[in-house]
Every structure is written in structure tokens, then in C-alpha cells.
């Protein structure tokens, strides 16, 4: 019998302490595995208590100079599975284990290295199964075992890494928090700029040496420079030092490390020169008329100022990327008129509970989802359906929160409130998609993981080469090193994918298209074949009886028997037949011994006589008389489904049922073909009906898969995949769930309150076939934008670092550190701005400006560097 124990360990000072304890425990006989997490101050040990007692484990930790106490114990059965994860740093339970997902709000991140660091410490924390940190969205998505850890422990792990963390509140509150962070950067930038502007005087002196002081700087200028630069360096720049310290504690580097090191070198060099000058002359002001060495306080001050400017602008533009979610939530009503006793009272939306009776008057928003219990009205559901005409509502009908009541007053019972409403679920789904990672981001993450150490190495080599090999002055060599450090920008790399993903998924939500994450976007690029399920996707999914033919019985009697049988059926055709019976005022009987044969028909007894209702082959199998083939063929060639009624002896009559095409179905098929995609249709209808409908929408006859039972659709999709195609399946999200799961890309089509948000990787809320085209176009454009951003982030660094290292100084190209810092700030802003161009996406429209963006961005970077390099030379 194995036992697993989680212990809390106090006294560890660094990851090396954790490794020492871990190796010592693993060396004990009877210990199967031991993991020690420095950040979480915990260890997880699996051992055989018959070979080594628990106290011996605790004593071993104590002998090493640390203290250990037991937090949790758990026994593992012989057949139980033991899971360890090298990434999570903890043991996971077997297949039956429960897991929980939580989204945490993170503050204090300055680059992707910060996000990678937080992700790493979370994965090392015991009980964590999966962790994803999104720098752009400032959120962490964590899947963990609640028996091994808790939300509070996860928050503590992040805080110990040097960052702020809290459970994510509602999206509106998160938006306010984001705005507060942006305002904080704005204030810090403005104060930093105010203190840095006087230092610009020293930069001007390089242009005009005949100004007061000239090349011989007055000693008091050094003192004033020190006074202005110090608060910028250690007050407004303190966050960079804190970030560097947090990274160093975890043996890592981040963007903060680059800024802190670069500005500290410039500030420290200037301070050393100034103090040496002061000590040489025995006065803070030095001797009158003496020449002071060059001081670079303005370099460190403007570096921090420009970085804060970049963070402010970046924050403002990043906040726009999640605007779509905020707009969705802004659609909600703020109050509801809830029945309390015998009267209705206005209460805040947060106080509405399931089961409350709510009154809605004309022109008001419906506050939550529910079911009408009294009154009649017409409701504008264009928010979800895209249908401009109001939908009639009567008792028993569903209503959706945030839709608008147009005419009469009505009362309804709340069935879904808070986070369970359709609107809230859509907003949450979009937020989760924005927090996801596209596989292409792995490239950026791998680069970012080694980026800062490589940059610091290049900066050191730059200094050594210029100072020792090329004989440059100490100040020139140091400034070249500082320029390399501050121009390098892992932020641009880190923002490339998530910002485009956030804008793209948000834009999709505006059109009622829910794209569930970055992985889905990449799949779209590989799709070469789209399969439509016919019913409810290309057609309305609301068939109606168009023809009644009585053969052995009257038409009304055929309708009565068929409708009586269909009372017990859930097939879409059943509703059409029952609706026809209601229109004709037919009185229905009772059915006994009802049996359904999916994809074929139904059988039941009425007044002790057995009847068969179904397709031609089903009736032919169960009836001596053969169906009227000519009549059946004529209706089927018109695209109508024929339902025959018979007894075991003879055919009594038939009904022709038609399902009208959705508006835009034909246009959608043609547009998909224009995108270079093959278009197929799968249906349970017989081949004649299927071909007639396919001809209407423009699908080739050999691309029609007919007579397919619901459970066989997934098999047909698999067959197409085995033929070498990358298949997207478009279905209703409920009946087609297996096919959606088998397809390379599942696109679920919903309609208003019936939308199935959980199915499909792309959900089309409005049910419009043309939204399939829009979804694919938007996904392709979003992936294109991600690739553009990654290219330009790499292009910027590959171009900027050599210029900053003065490699091209012989050609007149060099960069002062403060201008290098400004270039770094602008690079992040430009990547985010490029992502924001997706907001101009319009279905079926060519956005010329967005297409020119790659050329414009390339020209911008070249112009930026040439301008700054020229300015640096003149300075």
C-alpha cells in the first residue's frame, strides 16, 4: 500500500534548497517519488509506510535545517493510478479525480517573460494540472485538483513570484480594473516627463555648445540633474526593480531586468562621475570654471519616461482589444421589476433569483432568461438571431435576457440568471477564447524564454568589443551596451498573438460568431472541404406539409391517423404534421404500442389497428402493397420529403413535406467555393430529394451524401478525412454532436435561445449560413494578422539590435539609449495597433488599408530607425 502526503516546508531561501530536500528524500528507501516546490513552500511525497515511516521523512527535512509539517495524507490502492506531471510539479489523481478550473486576474506583468515565469511557478505548484497565462489579457487560467491545492494557495504562489493576483471578478469589474491600471501608467509617465524635461537641456547643449555653460558644464547642473533623475529612477522606475528582483529570485530574466539594468548602468555611471568630480573639488558644486565629465542622467530618466509612455499607450490600445466583451455586457439591463408579495419592485439585476416573477413593459429590456407565464408581446431578438422582425411571445415561450420588448406587457419566470444567462455565457465564452493560446504562439514563447539572456549577452559583448578591442571610450562603450539592452523588445513578440486573437474573437462576437480560441483559428487555414447538414443549417429546419394525398382513405382521415401517430414522435417532420392537423381542426385519437425506427419511420396502434408511417422503403418492408412510386418520385424531384401511411395490407395515403431554404444559403455555398473550398451536403433524405435541394443551393450532385442515419453522419465525415481532406462540419450543435466532434473543425449553428454554446469549436449564434463564410474569412484574417505581428516583432529586433550596438556607426547609423527606449516603446504600440486594424473587418468587403498594413509597418520601422539614428548622430 502506497501513501501520498503533502507537507509544508519552511526555511527554504531559493530553488537550490528545494532541490537539496527533494534529492535527499528521493534517496530514502521506500520513497517512490518526491517533489518539492520552492514557490509554493510545499512538497508532495509518495512512499511505502511499511519501509519508511512518515516521521522519518519529516526528520530528514529537519536534519537539513528546514521544518516540515503534514498538510494532507492520502492512501493509494494497489490498482490506483498514480500520475505525475513534470510540468505541474505535483501528482495528479487517477481518472476518477475531480478537477476545477479558475480564472485569475494578474497585475504587474510587463512582458511575456513575466507571463512565462508565472506559468512556470503555477505548473510547479502541487495539484496544478494545467496553467495558461495570457500577458495581453492579464489573466491566468488554471486547472487544479481541489484536494491538493486551493485558489488561495494559487494566489499566494503568484504573489510570492512578485505579481498581484486575485480571483477574476465579473468582466465589467475587470474592465474597470484595467482602466485603473492605464490611468496609473499615465500618471507615472506625466510625473516622470515633468521631472525629465529639465534634463533635456543637457541634450540641447550638445547641439548648441555656445548656450550658457557650453561644453564646460557648471557644477550646479550636475547636482540639479541628480536631483531630477533620482526620483524618476527610484520612484517611478521602482516597479522595474521589483520585477527584476522577482525574476532573479526565480532564476529568470524579464523585460523589467532589461530596463532596470540599462537605466542603472546609465544612472550609476553618471553618479560615479559626478561624485568623483565632487570629491575631487571638495564641494557639491565643485570649483568654479572647472570642466565636469559627461553625465548621462537624462539617458536613464528619459529611458524610464519613454518606457512608461509605451506602457500607457500599450495599455490604452490593449483595452480596446477586449471592447467586444464589454459591449456585450453593456447590453444587459441594470434593474428588474420583480414581484415581491402582491406588488412589483425595481431591484438591481444582481438580486434577481431563479423562480422570480418579473414584469416587462413595452420598450424595456428583458433582464434575464425565462419563460412567459402571463401576457402577450412581440420581442426584438435581433441581438441573437439577426432577425429584424419582432418575435411573437405567448405563455410558455422562452425569452432571452437583453432582448427588447416591443409591444405588450408580460410576466415571466426567471429560469437563468447571472452567469447562466445566454448573454453572460456568450461573453464568458468570448473571454475564455481571448485567454487561450494559438499553437503558433509556442514559437513566440520559445523565443521569449531565451530572449532576455541572449540580449544581455549581446550587450556585454558589445561593451567588451568596443572598449577593449576597438579602443572606444568608456562612455561610448557603456552607452552602446545600454542601447542594446533597452531597444530589445520581447513585449512586441508577446503581444503579437494574443492581441490579434482578442480583437478577432471579439469581432466575431459582434457578428454572432463565437470562435473558441487560438487553436481553432489555426485549424481553419487547413480546411479544404465543408460538409453541411441539410436540416436546420441550409434549410429553416421547420418543415411544413404542402400536399395531402388520400388513396384508400380520405385526405382528412390520412391526416388524422398520421398526426395521432406523430404525437409520440420527436422527429422534425412530426411537428409539421401536427401543425397541419391543428390548422385543419383535426381531433386526434390515442396511440398504443408506439415504436420509432430512427431514419425510417414509426409504428403504432389506433383503435386496435396497426399503422405504419415513414419513408417508402420502410412502408415497402411492412406492407404487402407497394407504394405509389410515380407520385413519390414526382414529389421528391421537387425537393419534398414523402411520408407514406399504410397498414400491413395496403397504402392508405401520403403526405409531402417541404423545408424551405434559408435566405443566403445559395450565396453562402458559392462564396465558399470562391474561397477554394469543396462543399458537400449530408442528409437523411433519399437521394432524389437530396439532389433537388442540392441543385437549389448550388452543390454538385456527386457531393451529396443522402440517406444517412443520424448516427452515421460521423462515419461519413471520417470517411472524407480518410480520403485526405481536412473537413469542417456544419450542423445544428445538438443532433449532430458526434459529427461535429469527429470533424477537423466543428461549426455549430444555433438559433436564438436554442443555441448550443457547448458544442462546436465555432458557434454561429444567429443561424445564418453566410456566417459560415464570415467565420472562415475572419479566422483566416486573424491568423494572417498574427503572422504579420510575429514577423514584424522579429524584424524590429533583428534590425534594431545591430543599430543599437553601433555595428553600422561607420555608415552614420547609431542610436542613443533614450531614443532606443522610445523605439522599443513604439514597437509594442505598433503591433497592438496592427491587431486593432481587425476591428475594420466587414464580411465580404475588402479592407485595402488592412492589406497594406504589412508594407506600412515595414516602412514605419525603417523610417523610425533611420530617423532616430540620424538624430542620434547629430546629438
Image (cartoon, rainbow, N blue to C red):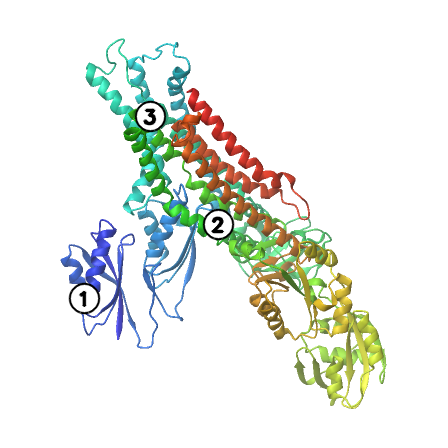
Up/down of 366 relative to 457, above or below: below
Up/down of 215 relative to 627, above or below: above
First in sequence: mark 3 vs mark 1:
1
Spatial distance from mark 3 to mark 2, Cα to Cα?
52 Å
Can see residue 606? Answer: no
Quick one: 578 or 63, which is closer to the camera? 63
* Residue 170: mark: 2
Residue placed under numbered mark 3 in the picture: 476
* Quadrant position of residue 602: bottom right
Q: Residue at x 68, y 65 (%)?
A: 680
Up/down of 807 relative to 274, above or below: below
Q: Residue at x 48, y 45 (%)?
A: 173
Element type at marker 3?
Answer: helix
Count of marks placed on residues: 3
Q: Disc 2 or disc 1, which is closer to the eye?
A: 1
| Residue 182 in the figure: left or right of residue 619 | left
Spatial distance from mark 3 to mark 1, Cα to Cα?
57 Å
How far from the left and from the top, in percent, is residue 373? 65, 62
Spatial distance from mark 2 to mark 1, Cα to Cα?
48 Å
Element type at marker 2?
Answer: loop
Amino acid at each position: 500500500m502506497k501513501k501520498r502526503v503533502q507537507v509544508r516546508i519552511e526555511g527554504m531561501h531559493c530553488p537550490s534548497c528545494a532541490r537539496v530536500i527533494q534529492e535527499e528524500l528521493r534517496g530514502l528507501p521506500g520513497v517512490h517519488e518526491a517533489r518539492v516546490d520552492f514557490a509554493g513552500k510545499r512538497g508532495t511525497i509518495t512512499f511505502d509506510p511499511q519501509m519508511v515511516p512518515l516521521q522519518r521523512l519529516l526528520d530528514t527535512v529537519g536534519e537539513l535545517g528546514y521544518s516540515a509539517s503534514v498538510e494532507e495524507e492520502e492512501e493509494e490502492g494497489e490498482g490506483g493510478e498514480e500520475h505525475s506531471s513534470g510540468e505541474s510539479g505535483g501528482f495528479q489523481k487517477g481518472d476518477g479525480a475531480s478537477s476545477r478550473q479558475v480564472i485569475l486576474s494578474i497585475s504587474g506583468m510587463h512582458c511575456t517573460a513575466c507571463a512565462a515565469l508565472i506559468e512556470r511557478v503555477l505548473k510547479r505548484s502541487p495539484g496544478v494540472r494545467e496553467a495558461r497565462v495570457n500577458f495581453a489579457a492579464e489573466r491566468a487560467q488554471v486547472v487544479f485538483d481541489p484536494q491538493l491545492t486551493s485558489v488561495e494557495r494559487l494566489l499566494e504562489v503568484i504573489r510570492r513570484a512578485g505579481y498581484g493576483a486575485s480571483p477574476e471578478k465579473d468582466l465589467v469589474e475587470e474592465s474597470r480594473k484595467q482602466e485603473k491600471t492605464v490611468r496609473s501608467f499615465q500618471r507615472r509617465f506625466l510625473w516622470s516627463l515633468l521631472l525629465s524635461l529639465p534634463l533635456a537641456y543637457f541634450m540641447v547643449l550638445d547641439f548648441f555648445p555656445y548656450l550658457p555653460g557650453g561644453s564646460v558644464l557648471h557644477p550646479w547642473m550636475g547636482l540639479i540633474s541628480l536631483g531630477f533623475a533620482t526620483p524618476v529612477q527610484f520612484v517611478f522606475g521602482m516597479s522595474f526593480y521589483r520585477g527584476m528582483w522577482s525574476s532573479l529570485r526565480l532564476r529568470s530574466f524579464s523585460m523589467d531586468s532589461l530596463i532596470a539594468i540599462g537605466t542603472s548602468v546609465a544612472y550609476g555611471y553618471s553618479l560615479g562621475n559626478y561624485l568623483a568630480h565632487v570629491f575631487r573639488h571638495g564641494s557639491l558644486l565643485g570649483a568654479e570654471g572647472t570642466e565636469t565629465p559627461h553625465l548621462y542622467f537624462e539617458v536613464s530618466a528619459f529611458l524610464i519616461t519613454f518606457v512608461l509612455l509605451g506602457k500607457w499607450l500599450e495599455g490604452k490600445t490593449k483595452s480596446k482589444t477586449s471592447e467586444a466583451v464589454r459591449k456585450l455586457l453593456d447590453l444587459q439591463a441594470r434593474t428588474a421589476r420583480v414581484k415581491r408579495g402582491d406588488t412589483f419592485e425595481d431591484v438591481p439585476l444582481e438580486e434577481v433569483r431563479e423562480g422570480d416573477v418579473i414584469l416587462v413593459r413595452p420598450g424595456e429590456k428583458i433582464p434575464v432568461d425565462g419563460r412567459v407565464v402571463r401576457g402577450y408581446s412581440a420581442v426584438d431578438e435581433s441581438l441573437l438571431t439577426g432577425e429584424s422582425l419582432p418575435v411573437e411571445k405567448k405563455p410558455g415561450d422562452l425569452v432571452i435576457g437583453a432582448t427588447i420588448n416591443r409591444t405588450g406587457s408580460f410576466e415571466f419566470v426567471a429560469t437563468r440568471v447571472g452567469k447562466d444567462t445566454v448573454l453572460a455565457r456568450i461573453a464568458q465564452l468570448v473571454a475564455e477564447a481571448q485567454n487561450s493560446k494559438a499553437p503558433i504562439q509556442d514559437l513566440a514563447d520559445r523565443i521569449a524564454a531565451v530572449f532576455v539572456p541572449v540580449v544581455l549577452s549581446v550587450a556585454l559583448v558589445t561593451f567588451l568589443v568596443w572598449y577593449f578591442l576597438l579602443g572606444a571610450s568608456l562612455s561610448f562603450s557603456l552607452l552602446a551596451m545600454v542601447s542594446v539592452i533597452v531597444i530589445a523588445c520581447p513585449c512586441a513578440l508577446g503581444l503579437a498573438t494574443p492581441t490579434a486573437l482578442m480583437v478577432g474573437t471579439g469581432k466575431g462576437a459582434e457578428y454572432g460568431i463565437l470562435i473558441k480560441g487560438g487553436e481553432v483559428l489555426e485549424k481553419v487555414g487547413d480546411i479544404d472541404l465543408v460538409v453541411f447538414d441539410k436540416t436546420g443549417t441550409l434549410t429553416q429546419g421547420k418543415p411544413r406539409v404542402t400536399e395531402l394525398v388520400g388513396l384508400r382513405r380520405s385526405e382528412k382521415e390520412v391526416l388524422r391517423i398520421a398526426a395521432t401517430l406523430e404525437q409520440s414522435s420527436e422527429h422534425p417532420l412530426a411537428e409539421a404534421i401536427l401543425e397541419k392537423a391543428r390548422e385543419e381542426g383535426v381531433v386526434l385519437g390515442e396511440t398504443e404500442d408506439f415504436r420509432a425506427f430512427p431514419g425510417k419511420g414509426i409504428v403504432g396502434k389506433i383503435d386496435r389497428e396497426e399503422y405504419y408511417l415513414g419513408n417508402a422503403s420502410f412502408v415497402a418492408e411492412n406492407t404487402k402493397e407497394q407504394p405509389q412510386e410515380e407520385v413519390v418520385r414526382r414529389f421528391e424531384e421537387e425537393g419534398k420529403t414523402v411520408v407514406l401511411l399504410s397498414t400491413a395490407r395496403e397504402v392508405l395515403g401520403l403526405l409531402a413535406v417541404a423545408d424551405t431554404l434559408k435566405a443566403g444559403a445559395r450565396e453562402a455555398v458559392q462564396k465558399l467555393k470562391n474561397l477554394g473550398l469543396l462543399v458537400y451536403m449530408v442528409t437523411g433524405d433519399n437521394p432524389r430529394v437530396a439532389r433537388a435541394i442540392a441543385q437549389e443551393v448550388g452543390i454538385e450532385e456527386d457531393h451529396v451524401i443522402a440517406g444517412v442515419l443520424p448516427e452515421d453522419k460521423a462515419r461519413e465525415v471520417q470517411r472524407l478525412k480518410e480520403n485526405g481532406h481536412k473537413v469542417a462540419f456544419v450542423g445544428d450543435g445538438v443532433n449532430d454532436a458526434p459529427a461535429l466532434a469527429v470533424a477537423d473543425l466543428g461549426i455549430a449553428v444555433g438559433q436564438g435561445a436554442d443555441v448550443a454554446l457547448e458544442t462546436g469549436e465555432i458557434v454561429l449564434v444567429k443561424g445564418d449560413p453566410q456566417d459560415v463564410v464570415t467565420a472562415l474569412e475572419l479566422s483566416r484574417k486573424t491568423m494572417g494578422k498574427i503572422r504579420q505581428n510575429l514577423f514584424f516583432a522579429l524584424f524590429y529586433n533583428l534590425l534594431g539590435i545591430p543599430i543599437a550596438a553601433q555595428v553600422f556607426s561607420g555608415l552614420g547609423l547609431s542610436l542613443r539609449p533614450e531614443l532606443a527606449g522610445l523605439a522599443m516603446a513604439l514597437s509594442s504600440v505598433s503591433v497592438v495597433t496592427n491587431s486593432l486594424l481587425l476591428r475594420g473587418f466587414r464580411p465580404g468587403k475588402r479592407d485595402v488599408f488592412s492589406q497594406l498594413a504589412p508594407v506600412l509597418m515595414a516602412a514605419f520601422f525603417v523610417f523610425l530607425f533611420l530617423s532616430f539614428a540620424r538624430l542620434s548622430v547629430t546629438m
